[in-house]
Image: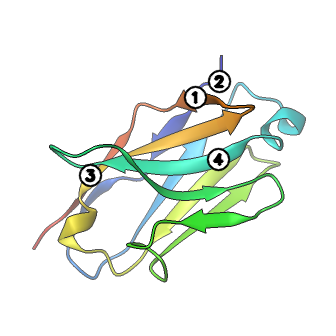
Amino acid sequence: QVQLVESGGGLVQPGGSLRLSCAAPRLITSVFWGYTMGWYRQAPGKQRELVAAIASRDATNYADSVKGRFTISRNNSQKKVYLHMNSLKPEDTAIYYCNANQGGVDYWGRGTQVTVTS
């Protein structure tokens, strides 16, 4: 079982920044390296959607709505993945979930709330 622990959510004004972190404490480093890690979000009344993903060799993929504003990165030695969010907008308000995928099997964190409001 892959445990994922998110942190870093909170309340921020439009135009502000946040950094989300996700740790996988039970994975050994060599195993973490093989997972594609991602961030998803779910706003009230909407389906969960992919925000950004980063593969084992650091190839990245972003939702069109966050391109140029969000950056995903990973530190394999620390078994962590990060989401740097800049120029936040009210429509970025959602619960953000960390995801680990390998061989079509998904693991999820419990989520962290991000609220963008003035």
Q: Please, what is the three-letter code of the amino acid marked with disc 4?
A: Met
Q: Sort mark 3 into few (<14), some (14-19) or many (20+) by Cα contacts within 10 Å.
A: many
Left or right side of 92 for 85:
right
Q: Position of residue 69 (x, y in %)?
A: 44, 79
Q: What numbered label is drawn on residue 107? A: 1
Residue 94 is tagged as 3
Cα distance between the residues tagged 2 and 4? 12 Å
Q: Residues within 10 Å of mark 2 (few under 14, many from 20)?
A: some
For the N terminus, give its image quadrant.
top right
Q: Is residue 83 above or below residue 37?
A: below
Residues under numbered marks 1 and 2 in contact, where contact means CB atoms less than 8 Å apart: yes
Q: Do tag 4 and tag 1 residues touch (Cβ < 8 Å)?
A: no
Residue bearing mark 2: 2
User: Of marks 1 and 3, which one's residue comes earlier in the chain?
Assistant: 3
Nearest the eye: 11 or 69: 69
- Marks 1 and 2, how far apart in space? 6 Å
Give residue 37's mark.
4
Q: Is residue 26 above or below residue 19?
A: above
In three-dimensional space, the C-alpha distance between marks 4 and 1, rounded to whole angstroms, equals 10 Å
